[in-house]
Image (cartoon, grey):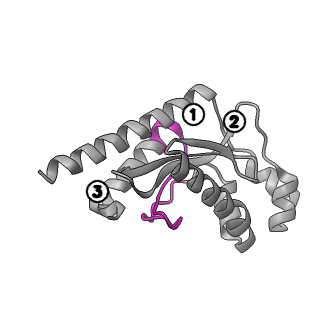
Amino acid sequence: MQLTDLLSIEKWTELELELADKFNLQSSVFNPDGIRITNNPNWANSLCPVIKSTEKGQSFICAVAHMNMSNQARETKKAVVEECDAGLLKLVVPIFFKEEYLGVVGGCGLLAEDGEVDEFAINKITEMDEEKIQALSADVQTITDNAVQDACDFLRKRVEEIINDYTDRQK
């Protein structure tokens, strides 16, 4: 089974946009291999697209954080909230059908209440100039712990609805 058996790409995109609208997160749906199933750029800030546009940034900041968190969500069957090496918050909620792991839905690109952009790490990993990093970081917003919990609850509820709707359609 695949995520597109549950919902069309268009419907997954709608969920991403809803998450972005409600919580200002860059939202994505990923399959079990860590590959986005949509092509919906909804950046939460100016820094993330520049990090992702560099091979080292994509490989050593974004992909590492995602795969670690996705694997943790697969094993615990619970939402996972962590920071990437750039210091930005990322959350993922696992998607299971029965016992089969289909991927995660989540978002990233904001700072935790007590967080800060790790300009040093970004510079070391991507070799991007620190002044450029500072300038790109100017529009990074903060998300409260309560809003993070609300985002996780929202996604858990939506995933449950999606699974239930699929199950009902199979009857």
Where does the image place residue 108, in percent across and percent down from the top left?
60, 48
- Residue 47 in which image quadrant: bottom right
Q: Kindly indicate whether the residue at mark 1 contacts the one at mark 2 (C-beta within 8 angstroms).
A: yes
Q: Which residues are magenta?
A: 20-42
Residue found farthest to the bottom: 55
- Which residue is depicted at the point 58% across and 56% down? 71
For residue 148, the mark is: 1
Residue on which the image places disc 2:
112
> Alpha carbon of mark 3 to alpha carbon of mark 1: how far?
25 Å
* Viewer-proximal residue among 70 and 17: 70
Of the image marks 3 and 1, the number of the one nearer the N terminus: 3
Tell me which secondary structure the magenta stretch mostly adopts.
loop
Residue 11 position in % (x across, y down):
31, 54
Query: Residue 7: in sight, yes or no?
Result: no
Q: Is residue 147 left or right of residue 61?
A: left
What distance separates the C-alpha of mark 2 from that of mark 1? 9 Å
Which type of secondary structure does the marked residue at label 3 adopt? helix
**Dot 2 or dot 1, earlier in sequence:** 2
From where the camera sits, is residue 86 visible?
yes
Q: Secondary structure at mark 2?
A: strand
Image mark for residue 6 = 3
